[in-house]
Amino acid sequence: MENTTRIQVPTMAEMMAKGESPDVLFWVGCAGSFDDRAKKITKAFVKILNHLDYKFAVLGTEESCSGDPAKRAGNEFLFQMQAMANIEVMNAYEVKRIVTTCPHCFNTLKNEYPELGGHFEVIHHTQMLQSLIDEGRLTVDGGVYKGKKITFHDPCYLGRANEVYQAPRSLIQNLDAELVEMKRCKSRGFCCGAGGAQMFKEPEKGSKDVNIERTEEALETKPDIIATGCPFCNTMMTDGVKNKEKEEQVKVLDLAEMIATAKDL
Amino acid sequence: MGISNLIFALCVGAAAFLFGKNVIKIKRNIMLGRDIDRSDRSSERWKTMARVALGQSKMVVRPVAGFLHILVYLGFVIINIEVLEIVIDGLLGTHRVFAFMGGFYDFLIGSFEILALLVLVSCVIFLIRRNVVQIKRFVMKEMDGWPKTDANLILIFEILLMSAFLLMQGADLTLQKLGAAHYIQAGAYPVSSFLASLFDGMSMEAVLGFERGFWWFHILGILGFLNYLPYSKHFHIILAFPNTYYSKLEPKGAFTNMESVTKEVQMMMDPNADSFAAPAEGVADEEPQRFGAKDVNDLNWVQLMNAYSCTECGRCTSECPANQTGKLLSPRKIMMDTRDRLEEYGANLDAKEKNPDDGKYLLDNYITREELWACTSCNACTQACPLNIDPLSIILDMRRYLVMEESAAPTELNTMFTNVENNGAPWQFSAMDRLNWKDEA
C-alpha cells in the first residue's frame, strides 16, 4: 500500500527566512538527488525524519557535489573549488551538524573540509538512526524483515575509511533479522568497485568486474537481502544481482529503506 | 689478544663501516622526497610503532604466517643478545664472557637454542610456502627474478646462521665435557646436546677446529647478512620502526589537501585578489613544483621510506579488488617500482658526470597509466600492510600529475569533471533540478 502523505523537505533558505535553524543539515548528495534508485533512499530517510518530527533541512539547489569523485580521480583543483564553495554556503547558514546518506560525502565533509575552513560534526545516516534508537526516540521492530537473512556490505568509505562498522549492523539486529557475514567483512571488506571515481568510467581490462566478485561473495551467504549504506554500493550490488539473475530472490536495500518499510512509512 | 682478535676487530669494523655507508646512501635517497610534516602527535606515533612494529599487531591477521613471523622476529631480537657476547669474546679473546651470570646465563643460552630451532623450522616452512606450495602472492609476475631470489636468499641465510649457531653450541658442549682449556662449563644446551653426538670420537683438536669454524662462520655470516640488508627487501627489519612511527594517523579516508592548490583556489575565489600581482620577493626565483608526481622526487619522503620498508609480502595485492579481478594494478608493484626507480635515480646522482635526468620517470617507465586508473581507492592495501605502507597515496599523487599537468584522464572522467564543474554533479543534470526528488511520487 503506497503511503500518500507528502514528505516535508524544508530548505535552509526557507528555515532562515522564518528565523529558524535546523538541528541537522541533511546533505543529500548527487546520487541521492539525481539517481533514480538512490532517490528512494533519500525519500525513505526523509520519511523517518518526518515521522519523528525531526527538525532538519536540506540545501536544495544550493548544494553542490562534495568534490569526492574529482579528488579521487586526481583533480584537486576541482575538488577544492567545490569544497570551498560548499563551505562558504554552509558557513553562511552557520551549519553545525550534518547527516548524509552517502559515505563518500560523509568522508569528504568530515575529513577533508575542516582544513579548508569547514568545521562540522558529520555523521552517516546509519549512525544517526542507531543513536535515535539508543535514545528511545525511534522504535523499530522487525516487521517484514523479522527472521530474514541479511548480509551487510561494508562501504569502503564508511568502514575502512572511517571505521564505522557497528551502527549498520546494530540496525539489522534491531530489525530482528539474522545478520550473516560475508567472508571478507568489516576492515577486510571487499570493495563494490565504484570508489575512486570508478563509478564514472569503464573498468580496466581484467578477468572479472569487481561488483560481480563481491556479489558472488554476498550470494554465498544465501541472503534474502543484501543491505548496504551507500548509493554507489547499492547500484553496483544491484547490477551484480541482476547479472546473476537473482533479482527475484535477493533484494539490495539501504538501511534507511528497511527501517522506513519496517515502520510502514 | 692475538692475531685472531685483530682480524675479528677488522671484520667488525669493516662491516660496520660498509653498512653505515649504505644506510647513509638510503637516507640520502629517502630525503630526495618532498617535505611532509609528520612531527605532530608524537605519543600517538610511539604507540602506533609499539603496536604495529614491535607488537606485530597486523601480522597476526593471517594467523599462520603471523605466528611463524613472530617466532623469527623474536628469535632475531633475542638471539642478538648472544651476538653481543660473541662480539665481546671476539674482540677480547675471552670465551663466554657473560658466564658469570650463572643460572641466568644458563637460562639465556637455553632459550637462545630453543628460539634458534624455532627460527630454523619457521624458515624451512617459509621456503616451502614460497617454493613448493607456491602461495599465489609469492609467485606473481612482479616477483620474477631478483625479488624471488632475494626472498629465498634471506631464508637460506637465516637457516645457515641458525645451523651454525647450534653446531657451534654442540661443539662447545663437547669441548666442555672433554675438559678443554678455556671452555668454561656454562650454559644450557637443550637443542645442541642432540647435535653433540656428531662430534663423538673426534680428537679434541678436531672438535676445537669445528667449534672455531662454526663460530667464525656464524659471526661472519651475521656481519655479511647485515651488509646484505641495504640491497634487500629485508631492510624492513630496520625501517619497520620509523615507517610505522611516521605513518598516517588520520582516518584512512582522509586524503591530503594540496596546499599549492588551496592558495590558487583562494585567489580565484577572492574578489579582491589581484591575480596579475607580482609574486612576493623571493618567490619568483623558486622553481614551481609539479602538481602531483611524475617521478620519485615528486613524492614525499614518507612515501619513499615506504618503498624501502616494503618487504614484498604481497598482502596488499592479495586484498586489492582491482588485482583480484585480474587488472594490472598491484599495490606491491607500486612500492617495488618506486624503490627500483629511486635506486636508479640515486645511482644517477652518484655518477657525478651524469645528470640525474636520464629521460626516465616513475610514470610510464615503471608504473603504467592503466595500473593507476584501476584503483578504487578502497584502502584495502593500506589496511592489509603490516607496516602501514600507503601505496594509495602514491597512486593518487600520480593521478594528480596525470590530471593537473597532462590533462590525461580517461575520457569518461573528463566528462565527469565537466559535469561537476558546470552542474555541480558528476552527471549531466541541471543544478536547478537538485531538489526535484521531493515532489516526485
Image (cartoon, coloured by chain):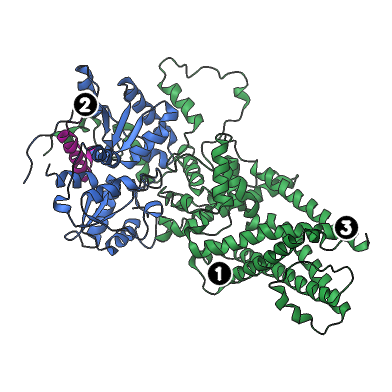
Chain colours: A blue, B green
Q: Quadrant of the N terminus of chain B?
A: bottom right
Q: Residues within 10 Å of mark 1 (few under 14, many from 20)?
A: some
Q: Is residue A38 visible?
A: yes
Callout in the foreground (1, 3): 3
Q: Quadrant of the C terminus of chain B?
A: top left
Q: Is residue B366 visible?
A: no
Q: Dot 2: what SS? A: loop
Compare marks 1 and 3 and give the one earlier in the sequence.
3
Callout 2: chain: A
Task: From the viewer's perspective, tell me whether residue B393 is left or right of residue B430.
Answer: right
Q: Which residues are magenta?
A: A33-54
Q: Tell me where residue B179 appears, x and y as whole percent.
A: 86, 74
Between B148 and B407, the residue placed more toward the observer is B148
Residue indicated by mark 3? B92
Callout 1: chain: B
Compared with A199, B166 (above or below) is below
Task: From the viewer's perspective, tell me whether residue A113 is left or right of residue A10.
Answer: right
Mark 2–mark 1 contact, CB under 8 Å? no
Residue indicated by mark 2? A11
Q: Dot 3: what SS? A: helix
Callout in the foreground (3, 2): 3
